[in-house]
Image: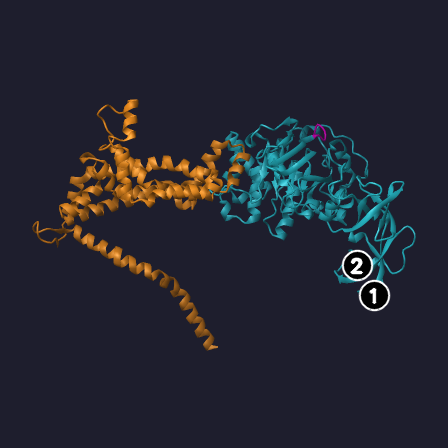
């Protein structure tokens, strides 16, 4: 009898322990390669450099943060504006695309999805350089726009905000298409039938049924585009000019060119804090936990 | 037995049922109040109380003034054929569905019943033929402009809306004023007994509750006809039986035409005023449950509804109303023949197991019998189920009650399987059963329906 109880106890202990065991590899990994470096970075953001050629020393140097705000406010706001515009543009392109693939794709669904992912087979940098060629001064896009008269004789697309936003949209578009497709694909077509049966034309059925049910996909896609786009520096570097510098370029410059680690670290933390705030507000507005 | 069961089913007052408010019934049928129609109104005249069974028997009731213009067709299916590529899903369906009728389309999967329903709803267009709603051709009318509503197979409730918003969906689409919406939604939630559930999401409801939300969502629009696509398929047996009575009650109280699609013959028999039995796109027979069961028009109908012994037979001649058929080798039987059974042709003799009797001795004149060997017998409570074999190897089944007063029988014993002349029926091979009784018979409909009260 006692034996049985003991075995029971053991079993229960095992049952309680197993989720932790399953979590362990992930937790250890995250601790070693995320939380620990994050802490180091935080320490760095509060350090100062005794001189240009010495290593930074910790010393509650909050001035790094005020410098980050006061000197680079413009780049911060530009980053979030560009990322926001790229997210909207990607949404405008991706939603109809995902909709057609999900509801009208038929047996070509997987082929079409494959085509959406194909650009990923090319390196990110190469894609950006390709985009530079496409919208370059000798490219057919600029030629056409000049011929129509949208661009003046000596105007170009490169080095302007539109080139950067376009590049961001182009590079992160698949991240928007895929989650929206998944959300749309899950919608039971009979719900649309039901809406049409209940005196709703196609447009009302879309507004009241399909769109609300696809919001989790829109939410996920927007975050997957917005966050990396806001932190990106490659597009602004290759497609923009000094007037389109984003916060990613500043961080890159501080770390690798100025070697001013404390300010670069402070910039990174400010960026992270702003992104987190935006995500929280955004999820409150969309109320996704309610839908999922 | 069947008749008794049906009577009982309808006689059971809804135990916790909320009765339809008078105002709701008046809103549905504006003529009712002024006309002072008796309680047992309508073409069926079936009533909730067993005691109200009417003395006229089979005689047609006098026409009722006011409640309805007449027993006219709400929906006409006029020689409708639907093809998907080379596949003919519905083959020349032609029938009318009357106002206030509980009409079922019954058949195995792929028989075209759901396609027919979807054509009535407007989700599919007939390849040829015409579907009329209140006499108007619906061919080019999209679903959202048709005054019919559907209860879908898996309910198709909107998961992101609560019960209230689900039910109000159709009314909001048609811009019904707010106070009216709120009154009608409340009324209907009462009818389906979900008054306390308005704030719940569909995901928080049981299958039976979801089913009733779907019903309320469709009925709240006061449709000309309610289309139900196997609505009970996802429920367990107990709940399904309860919902059958519930559906019947709601249909009777709201007096709305129900068009019910099912593959479950028992369900169709329990609830319907008339049943259309479909097979491979063709309507095999249309009739009351009693007609379908006792006078099947084809072998398919006989086999699909209830149990039936089917014996190969050859029509040998006529004896007045009855046909003379040769079965089981050299036995000549006089038997009622379904339309389409030709002299000299192959046919099938049908005898229901419960209409068969067993006798040890050769039956007297007036009783038809064929000699058989007992293969197996199983005691089933009210009846003993006998499995019998005749000379040509065909297996027959007889359900024998205590009134047959048999000696103890064992497998291998010889007995006569007998039946009254009226109990058997000669059927044409499936697919050659035209012309069918009950098709295109809206005029006869009232008589048929009344005659089986």
Residue at numbered disc 2: B388
**Residue at 78%, 31% in the rendered image:** B62
* Residue A116, above or below B385: above
Number of the label disc, if any, that sits on residue B256: none
Q: Secondary structure at mark 1?
A: loop
Query: Could you say which chain is coloured orange in the image?
Result: A
What is the magenta range?
B67-72
Number of the label disc, if any, that sits on residue B408: 1
Residue placed most toward the observer, A136 or A271 = A136
Task: Tell me the quarter of the picture where residue B126 sits.
Answer: top right
Across and down, in percent, residue A31 comes to: 27, 58
Q: Are marks 1 and 2 on the same chain?
A: yes
| Labelled pair 1, 2 in contact (Cβ < 8 Å) | no
Across and down, in percent, residue B427 comes to: 79, 44
Badge 2 local density, few (<14 within 10 Å), some, or many (20+)? many
Is B124 on the left-hand or right-hand side of A221? right
Task: Tell me the quarter of the picture where residue A81 sits.
Answer: top left
Q: Secondary structure at mark 2?
A: strand
Real-space Cα separation, disc 1 to disc 2, in angstroms = 15 Å
Chain B on-screen colour: cyan
């Amino acid at each position: 009898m006692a034996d049985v109880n003991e075995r029971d106890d053991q079993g229960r202990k095992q049952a309680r322990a197993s989720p932790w065991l399953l979590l362990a590899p992930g937790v250890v990994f995250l601790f070693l390669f995320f939380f620990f470096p994050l802490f180091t970075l935080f320490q760095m953001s509060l350090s100062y450099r005794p001189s240009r050629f010495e290593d930074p020393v910790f010393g509650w140097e909050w001035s790094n943060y005020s410098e980050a705000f006061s000197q680079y406010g413009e780049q911060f706001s530009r980053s979030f504006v560009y990322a926001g515009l790229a997210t909207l543009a990607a949404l405008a392109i991706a939603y109809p695309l995902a909709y057609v693939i999900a509801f009208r794709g038929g047996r070509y669904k997987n082929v079409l999805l494959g085509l959406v992912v194909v650009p990923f087979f090319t390196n990110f940098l190469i894609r950006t350089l390709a985009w530079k060629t496409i919208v370059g001064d000798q490219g057919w896009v600029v030629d056409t726009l000049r011929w129509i008269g949208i661009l003046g004789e000596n105007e170009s697309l490169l080095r302007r905000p539109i080139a950067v936003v376009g590049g961001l949209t182009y590079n992160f578009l698949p991240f928007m298409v895929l989650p929206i497709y998944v959300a749309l694909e899950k919608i039971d077509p009979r719900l649309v039938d039901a809406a049409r049966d209940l005196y709703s034309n196609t447009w009302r059925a879309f507004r009241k049924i399909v769109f609300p049910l696809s919001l989790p996909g829109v939410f996920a896609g927007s975050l997957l585009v917005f966050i990396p786009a806001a932190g990106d520096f490659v597009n602004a570097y290759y497609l923009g000019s000094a007037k389109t510098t984003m916060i990613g370029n500043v961080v890159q410059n501080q770390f690798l060119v100025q070697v001013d680690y404390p300010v670069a670290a402070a910039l990174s933390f400010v960026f992270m804090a702003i992104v987190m705030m935006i995500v929280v507000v955004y999820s409150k507005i969309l109320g996704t936990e309610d839908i999922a | 037995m069947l008749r008794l069961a049906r009577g009982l089913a309808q006689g059971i007052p809804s135990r916790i049922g909320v009765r339809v408010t008078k105002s709701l019934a008046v809103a549905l049928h504006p003529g009712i109040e002024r006309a002072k129609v008796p309680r047992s109104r309508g073409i069926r005249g079936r009533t909730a109380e067993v005691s109200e069974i009417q003395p006229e028997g089979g005689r047609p009731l006098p026409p009722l003034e006011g409640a309805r213009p007449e027993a006219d067709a709400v929906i006409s299916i006029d020689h409708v054929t639907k093809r998907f590529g080379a596949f003919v899903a519905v083959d020349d369906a032609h029938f009318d569905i009357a106002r206030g009728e509980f009409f079922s389309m019954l058949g195995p999967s792929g028989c075209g019943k759901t396609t027919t329903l979807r054509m009535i709803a407007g989700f599919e267009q007939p390849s040829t033929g015409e579907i009329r709603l209140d006499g108007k051709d619906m061919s080019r009318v999209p679903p959202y402009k048709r005054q019919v509503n559907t209860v879908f197979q898996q309910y198709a409730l909107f998961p992101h809306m609560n019960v209230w918003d689900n039910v109000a969906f159709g009314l909001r689409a048609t811009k019904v004023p707010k106070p009216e919406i709120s009154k009608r939604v409340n009324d209907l939630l009462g009818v389906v007994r979900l008054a306390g559930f308005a704030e719940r999401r569909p995901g928080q409801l049981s299958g039976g509750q979801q089913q009733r939300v779907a019903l309320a969502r469709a009925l709240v629009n006061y449709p000309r006809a309610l289309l139900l696509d196997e609505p009970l398929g996802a429920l367990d047996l107990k709940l399904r039986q309860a919902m059958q009575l519930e559906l019947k009650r709601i249909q009777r109280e709201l007096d709305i035409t129900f068009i019910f699609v099912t593959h479950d013959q028992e369900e169709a028999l329990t609830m319907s005023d008339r049943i259309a039995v479909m097979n491979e796109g063709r309507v095999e027979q249309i009739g009351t449950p009693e007609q379908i069961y006792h006078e099947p028009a084809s072998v398919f109908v006989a086999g699909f509804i209830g149990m039936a012994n089917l014996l190969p037979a050859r029509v040998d001649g006529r004896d007045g109303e009855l046909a003379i058929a040769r079965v089981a080798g050299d036995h000549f039987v006089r038997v009622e023949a379904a339309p389409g059974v030709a002299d000299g042709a192959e046919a099938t003799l049908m005898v229901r197991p419960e209409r068969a009797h067993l006798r040890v001795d050769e039956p007297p004149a007036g009783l038809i019998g064929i000699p058989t060997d007992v293969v197996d017998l199983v005691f089933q409570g009210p009846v003993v189920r006998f499995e019998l074999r005749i000379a040509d190897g065909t297996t027959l089944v007889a359900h024998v009650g205590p009134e047959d007063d048999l000696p103890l029988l064992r497998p291998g014993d010889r007995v006569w399987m007998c039946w009254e002349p009226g109990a058997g029926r000669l059927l044409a091979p499936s697919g050659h059963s035209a012309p069918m009784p009950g098709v295109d018979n809206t005029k006869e409909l009232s008589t048929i329906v009344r005659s089986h009260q």
